[in-house]
């Protein structure tokens, strides 16, 4: 039986290769994702290990709100007195305070010198043995007006020694002379981020934390182990700091980074699963067609004595071989794809480190297991079907699926209902993977039910679409009419083939609709909620990049400015939940004048008179935790303090500006350690010329705060929309893989249908049909099938977007908007996909030998 299976695969090698490639593409994205993320994690681990190899012990602020939460806008408890205390511990040979904070550096003309996706840092120069930087050109700064930059930034911005750049932190901007270009921990940069090295005292001044540090590096005397020294230091320091050995610090930084980058792996794996599910459709369809075509072959084997188990094992063995081949090809493709994914993220500004490809055993095992598993599961139903027909019935002409149509529909119905519930639950709770998998499994179950119950609803829809879509082709001649009739003749096969393309088109359509709605929602929210005239924010757009508080009085002093409201953001952990809650810090009086709040409980008077023991919560947060006006809340702050708040009001957060908790900025500075602003709203004085006031504000920002920019409401909304478009482009590129996989499904089906219609094609050639007309007929048929998949995909995508907006976004007044132009382009893409998929089958059909075709059975 094994020899028979192998011979059959060799004889049908085109189908085998096309099916294996369809599986391999999905596996390739999954393998490429694991390889990329493993490579990034390994690269960062090496960077952290190298950076900490000179440290016996490291002292850092305690991460009271969980691993990795240490926002630079929070004050640090490490001061010069603590450094002296550590230096005096028995066994310490040297202790040095480190300044390392987010910042900005620009050219003297105001141009940013870092990419949009990578952050910029300001660091102090450390003495040996703590210095993780090594000069490539020049040296380290020794004066307050000198700077050294990382090699990546120098190469990207074409910076030379002796040139000037502007470095900005919390203090006003200042020009520095470049005296060195450096490597960090043996690499060009810190994972793509830019670094500006300043002298220790100058770094403190620029960071706005004179007398304070972000870390203490400690070296041990000979004979003292890092653990012994750690324990001695820990016994003397307060609980507001964490004390680790250098190895522990490297491990902690690595784990923190892996957790922070975990979203990247999840994000990419979603698209890999989609491509794999599309591949499963193709395998199911291919095996279904081949089993139907080989019914007489299986009947003959049964007549000659083969058991049902042997016949079923032959089909399963074929699926096993295909799975192994697809898994191996996918693994190889993943190795080749990982650099492409890295390049894709670099193209959108995320320059992640890559110190050589990392291929873990887990990646190999999972790739092969998924490839084999998907193929076997998708081929299971056809394998069962191959043994469900009696030998005598199988030997009769025209036997096929009719005897097994009623089998299994109840199981499919149960699976479909569960999948639909998973989809609805996932969209309500914002679980994207569950929503996608639930939707696709529900679609598969619906297809199964249609097969088992006679296809009638789907057949009518498919026939109707084929008539409508094929009508223009039919009017162009006999080849178009034959193509339309071929699509109608077997609507089940047409629908199943189109379903693979339907999944990709549906997801693209859903994303496009949601993105268009997001942009419309942003525009509406900004226009309806923002009551001021200008928004001042850091031009980098990074979450960690803020504004110095000193900017507020200077903005207020600009002629024509009526008021400026400073807004900060931080986090806290309420006692009734394990996750952090977002916190917005506002100046109540001026905030009410610049921002319109919709109230569920309370009014603007509540916010205007907000005290330092009160908070306003969002309606969704209050609903989740059964809070109302007067409810008490105890929360842990980033400084380790527990604050006790009373709910003063409940607000609707339609614009997503408010935090789950909104407090006064005075409380945030005192108890949360808030140092920086996230954003500031400016309101013009009555009668002032808006254009002139903005010019004066822009002049102030260029001179003293070049990291900041002023935007009108429309400019802010437009920038947010551009960010949505960037993400949308990335998603389109990744979803394109599922569309490519679906092309192999169309190719497979057309190739198999050509084999099935060999005599028919020979007859057409015999009565005068030219090779060109045969090619044209196959192309028309492919385009009709692809457009049916496109239409179904757009309908499902629009409905899916509506469900997501209705259930998952019900609290935010999401504006539902439909990009008609984009949806029309998707139909054009589907048609082009059909034309592309038809090339190989069309050539094979046109090149059939006429006499052999007429003689075939």
Image (cartoon, rainbow, N blue to C red):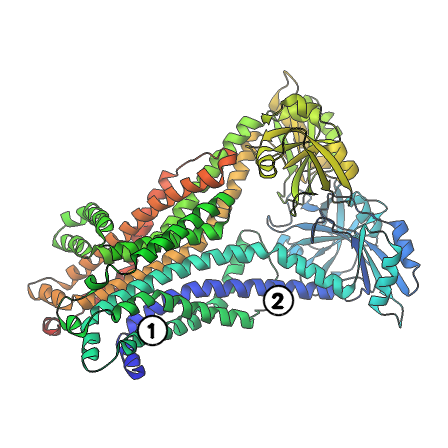
Residue lying at 12% horizontally and 74% vertically, measured from the top left: 852
| Residue that numbered label 2 is attached to | 355
Determine whether 101 is above or below 336 in the image.
Answer: above
- The residue at the far left in this view is 767
Is residue 730 shown to the viewer in this render?
no
Determine whether 90 is above or below 636 in the image.
Answer: below
The quadrant of the rendering that contains the C terminus is bottom left
Residue lying at 72% horizontally and 63% vertically, measured from the top left: 250
Mark 2 or mark 1: whose residue is earlier in sequence: 1
Q: CA distance from mark 2 to mark 1?
A: 42 Å
- The residue at the far bottom in this view is 3
- Give me the disc on residue 537: none
Q: Position of residue 208 (x, y in %)?
A: 79, 42
Q: Nearer the viewer, residue 410 or 394?
A: 410
Is residue 568 shown to the viewer in this render?
yes
Neighbours of disc 1 within 10 Å: few (<14), some (14-19), many (20+): many
Q: Nearer the viewer, residue 807 or 40?
A: 807
Q: Position of residue 509 (x, y in %)?
A: 39, 46
Is residue 844 left or right of 127 when viewed as pictured?
left
Q: Position of residue 642 (x, y in %)?
A: 76, 41
Q: Nearer the viewer, mark 2 or mark 1?
A: 1
- The residue at the far top in this view is 687
Q: Position of residue 775 (x, y in %)?
A: 19, 61
Secondary structure found at label 2:
loop
Neighbours of disc 2 within 10 Å: few (<14), some (14-19), many (20+): some
Q: Nearer the viewer, residue 444 or 357?
A: 444
Residue lying at 70% horizontally and 33% vertically, measured from the top left: 663
| Residue that numbered label 1 is attached to | 316
């Amino acid at each position: 039986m094994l020899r028979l299976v192998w011979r059959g695969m060799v004889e049908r090698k085109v189908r085998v290769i096309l099916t294996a490639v369809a599986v391999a593409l999905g596996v390739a994205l999954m393998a490429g994702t694991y390889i990329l993320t493993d490579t990034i994690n390994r690269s960062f681990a090496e960077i952290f290990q190298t950076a900490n190899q000179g440290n016996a012990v490291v002292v850092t602020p305690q991460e009271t709100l969980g691993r990795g939460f240490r926002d630079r806008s929070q004050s640090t408890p490490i001061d010069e007195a603590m450094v002296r205390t550590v230096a005096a511990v028995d066994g310490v040979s040297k202790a040095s305070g480190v300044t390392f904070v987010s910042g900005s550096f620009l050219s003297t003309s105001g141009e940013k010198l870092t990419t949009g996706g990578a952050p910029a840092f300001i660091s102090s120069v450390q003495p040996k043995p703590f210095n993780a930087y090594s000069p490539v050109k020049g040296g380290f700064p020794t004066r307050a007006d000198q700077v050294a930059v990382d090699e990546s930034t120098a190469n990207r911005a074409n910076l030379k020694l002796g040139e000037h750049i502007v470095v900005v932190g919390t203090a006003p901007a200042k020009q520095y002379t470049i005296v060195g270009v450096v490597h960090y921990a043996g690499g060009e940069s810190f994972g793509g981020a830019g670094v500006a090295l300043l002298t220790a005292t100058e770094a403190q001044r620029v960071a706005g934390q004179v007398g304070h540090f972000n870390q203490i590096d400690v070296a041990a005397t000979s004979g003292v182990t890092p653990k012994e020294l750690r324990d001695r230091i820990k016994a003397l320091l307060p609980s507001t700091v964490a004390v680790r050995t250098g190895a522990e610090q490297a491990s902690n930084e690595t784990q923190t980074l892996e957790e922070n980058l975990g979203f990247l792996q999840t994000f990419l794996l979603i698209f890999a699963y989609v491509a794999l599910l599309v591949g499963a459709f193709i395998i199911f369809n291919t095996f279904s067609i081949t089993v139907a075509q080989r019914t007489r072959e299986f009947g003959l084997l049964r007549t000659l004595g083969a058991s049902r188990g042997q016949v079923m094992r032959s089909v399963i063995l074929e699926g096993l071989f295909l799975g192994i081949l697809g898994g191996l090809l996918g693994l190889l493709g993943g190795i080749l794809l990982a650099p492409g994914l890295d390049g894709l993220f670099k193209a959108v500004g995320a320059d992640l480190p890559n110190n050589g490809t990392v291929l873990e055993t887990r990646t190999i095992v999972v790739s092969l297991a998924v490839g084999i598993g998907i193929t076997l599961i998708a081929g299971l139903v056809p394998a069962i079907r191959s043994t469900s027909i009696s030998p005598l019935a199988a030997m009769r002409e025209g036997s096929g699926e009719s005897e097994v149509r009623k089998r299994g529909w109840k199981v499919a119905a149960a699976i479909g209902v569960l999948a639909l519930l998973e989809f609805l639950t996932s969209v309500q709770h914002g679980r994207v993977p569950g929503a996608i998998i639930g939707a696709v499994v529900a679609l598969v179950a619906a297809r199964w039910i249609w097969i088992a119950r006679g296809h009638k609803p789907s057949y009518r829809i498919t026939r109707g679409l084929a008539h409508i879509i094929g009508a223009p082709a039919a009017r162009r001649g006999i080849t178009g009419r034959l193509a339309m009739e071929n699509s109608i003749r077997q609507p089940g096969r047409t629908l199943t083939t189109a379903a693979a393309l339907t999944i990709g088109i549906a997801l693209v359509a859903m994303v496009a609709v949601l993105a268009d709605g997001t942009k419309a929602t942003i525009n509406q929210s900004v226009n309806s909620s923002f009551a001021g005239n200008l928004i001042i924010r850091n031009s980098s757009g990074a979450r960690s990049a803020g504004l110095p508080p000193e900017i507020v009085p200077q903005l207020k002093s600009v002629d024509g400015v009526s008021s400026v409201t400073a807004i900060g953001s931080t986090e806290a952990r309420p006692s009734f939940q394990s996750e952090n809650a977002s916190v917005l810090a506002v100046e109540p009086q001026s905030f009410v004048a610049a921002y319109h709040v919709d109230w569920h409980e309370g009014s603007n008077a509540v916010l205007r008179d907000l005290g330092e023991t009160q908070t306003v919560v969002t309606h969704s947060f209050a609903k989740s935790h059964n809070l109302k006006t007067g409810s008490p809340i105890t929360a842990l702050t980033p400084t380790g303090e527990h604050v006790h708040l009373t709910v003063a009001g409940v607000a609707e957060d339609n614009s997503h500006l408010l935090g789950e908790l909104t407090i006064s900025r005075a409380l945030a500075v005192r108890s949360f350690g808030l140092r920086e602003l996230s954003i500031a709203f400016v309101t013009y004085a009555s009668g002032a010329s808006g254009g002139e006031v903005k010019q004066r504000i822009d002049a102030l920002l260029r001179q003293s705060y070049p990291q900041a920019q002023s935007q009108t409401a429309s400019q802010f909304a437009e920038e947010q929309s551009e960010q949505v478009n960037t993400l949308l482009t990335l998603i389109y590129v990744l979803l394109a893989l599922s569309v490519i996989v679906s092309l192999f499904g169309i190719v497979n089906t057309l190739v198999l249908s050509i084999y099935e219609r060999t005599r028919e094609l020979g007859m057409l050639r015999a009565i005068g049909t030219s090779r060109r007309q045969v090619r044209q007929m196959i192309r028309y048929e492919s385009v009709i099938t692809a457009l049916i998949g496109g239409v179904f995909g757009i309908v499902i995508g629009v409905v899916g977007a509506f469900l997501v907006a209705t259930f998952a976004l019900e609290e935010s007044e999401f504006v539902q908007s439909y990009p008609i132009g984009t949806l029309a382009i998707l139909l054009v893409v589907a048609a082009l996909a059909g034309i592309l998929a038809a090339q190989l089958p069309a050539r094979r059909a046109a090149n059939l030998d006429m006499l052999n075709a007429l003689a075939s059975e």
